[in-house]
Amino acid sequence: MLKSLRSVHYRGLRPLVRGISYTPNNPNNSDQHVFQPVASRSNISPMRRTIPWLVALRAREKHIEDWYKTHGKDAGPPPSDTSYSYSDVKTRDVVDKSRSDSFTCALLPFKSDPWFMDAYINSSGRLRIGQIFQDLDALAGVIAYRHCSPAEPVIVTASVDRIYMLKRLDDISKCNVTLSGSVTWTGRSSMEITIKAATHTEDFEVGRDLTEQDIRDDEVFLTANFTFVARDPETKKSFPINRLVPRTEQEQVDFVHAEKFNNRKKLVASQTGLRLQPPSEEESAIIHYMWTKQKDYDSDPSSKPSNVVNMSQTKVYSTSIMQPQYRNRHSYMIFGGYLLRQTFELAYACASSFAHEAPRFVSLDSTTFKNPVPVGSVLYLTATVAYTEQTTRLIKTDGHVSEHVPGTLIQVRVDSTVRNLEHGTTTDTGQFTYSYFAATKEGQQPPSLLPQTYNEMMEYLEGRRKAIDTANFYTERRLGELQYVVSE
């Protein structure tokens, strides 16, 4: 269905989706257009299932039945299966690989196919970032499998280290977009994958294999960093992966930056956080100021400005059953990109409700997938505005600075938990932190957040620390100065 594994093309292809032939070159035929997530079309995509759900379900039921026959009904629940598809890793040999070995590119033909673009537009007519997130994670999975081949371990998303908007993309109908990336660093069983999203005004030749050199820096509007880990399907322990050998000076620079970041990430995880480090003198002063404001408002409720919102009033909730249509290629767990899309869109709803307008996405901060989400479980998501900051930034459109725009940086934290219906246990599956920018409307006061309890104040300080860490990451990766309002 693909021209190649190296580049994913859609113009001129006729993939069969749910029994309906989709023809990208016929943009007026809306009846034939059925959307399929872009990166799922690769035969090594983490969304590409190898067997129907019923086959995997029957196999799991047989596994459970055999477990109880062997251990007895009082033995407790059997170990959960994470993968149906992978039991043979093919080889355990570790070899050297280059960055070009894993480079993969997918084309989103927004300019040449209006009906394809229709699946990527939000209600404001801008790019639907949540859908892009799903594609980014799927593409990162393809890249990870390419790097590990010919071995076939279980590969999962461990964390999303950052996703940044680098410039505005106001009219996606005027350009085609490429998502491209490769492995930029490897450890023993983990790898960092960097993906860039870039705009292109030209139409690409059908069947052409794009290279990393075809992606110009001035065309890149988004960059994403993922960490994937490899696991042995039998032992569930770490699985050694192929070594990445930088071939050019730039590849070596990127490798060193990624290695420093991963070392720093481990250090930060072990030494920072308000559970380990109490508030600093500056942070204590912030807490005291917020406490005094709260006391003033309690004494005289009429003195509380209408733009001040209590943190507890910003919460937005979502509850959903995890259906098998959202499973990953291992069959029993939900695809990480789907979780990114769901959490982003809830966070967007939370930020929109807080700002009373459609905010602009700025970044996804460091996020860790703590536990997998099983098919058939109940997913609970809670979005909260955790931190706000009044700021003035420059709006940059098509490479030209237009004006200074005052507004509010809104950080939304989404807490994710999952409940297993079979035994009722609830598990923490991760925390996602999204940042948005809402421009201040003329004649109106910008929204302001007020934490009230001690726990909320700690959450506020955690959000502030994340905002500072994100700005530092931006500088460390040499992405330039963090000064532009950048968004979908």
Image: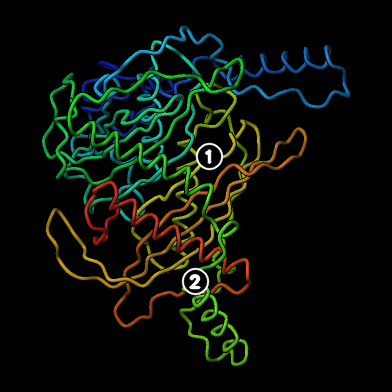
Q: Give the camera-side residue of 297 and 189.
A: 189
Within-10-Å neighbours for mark 2: few <14, some 14–19, many 20+ = some
Quarter of the figure with residue 394 = bottom left
Q: Where 357 falls versus 169 (above or below)?
A: below
Residue depth check, mark 1 versus mark 2: number of the one nearer the observer: 2
Residue shown at 41%/39% (left/top)? 262
Residue shown at 17%/57% (left/top)? 397
Residue position for label 2: 283
Which disc is residue 369 wearing?
Answer: 1
SS for dot 1: strand
Q: Position of residue 251 (x, y in %)?
A: 22, 31
Within-10-Å neighbours for mark 1: few <14, some 14–19, many 20+ = some
Which disc is residue 18 wearing?
Answer: none
Earlier along the polypeptide chain: callout 1 or callout 2? 2
Does residue 213 appear to the left or right of 261 in the view shown?
left
Q: Position of residue 346 (x, y in %)?
A: 49, 52
Quarter of the figure with residue 430 = top right
Does residue 478 appear to the left or right of 74 in the view shown?
left
Specify whether residue 396 is in view.
yes
Does residue 338 appear to the left or right of 78 in the view shown?
left
Q: Quadrant of the image for the N terminus?
A: top left
- Give the spatial CA distance, label 1 vs label 2: 28 Å
Q: Position of residue 270 (x, y in %)?
A: 53, 47
Q: How many labels were placed on the picture?
A: 2
Q: Where 297 falls versus 467 (above or below)?
A: below
Q: Give the camera-side residue of 458 and 34.
A: 458
Specify whether residue 34 is in view.
no
Label 1 amino acid?
Phe
Residue shown at 18%/27% (left/top)? 248
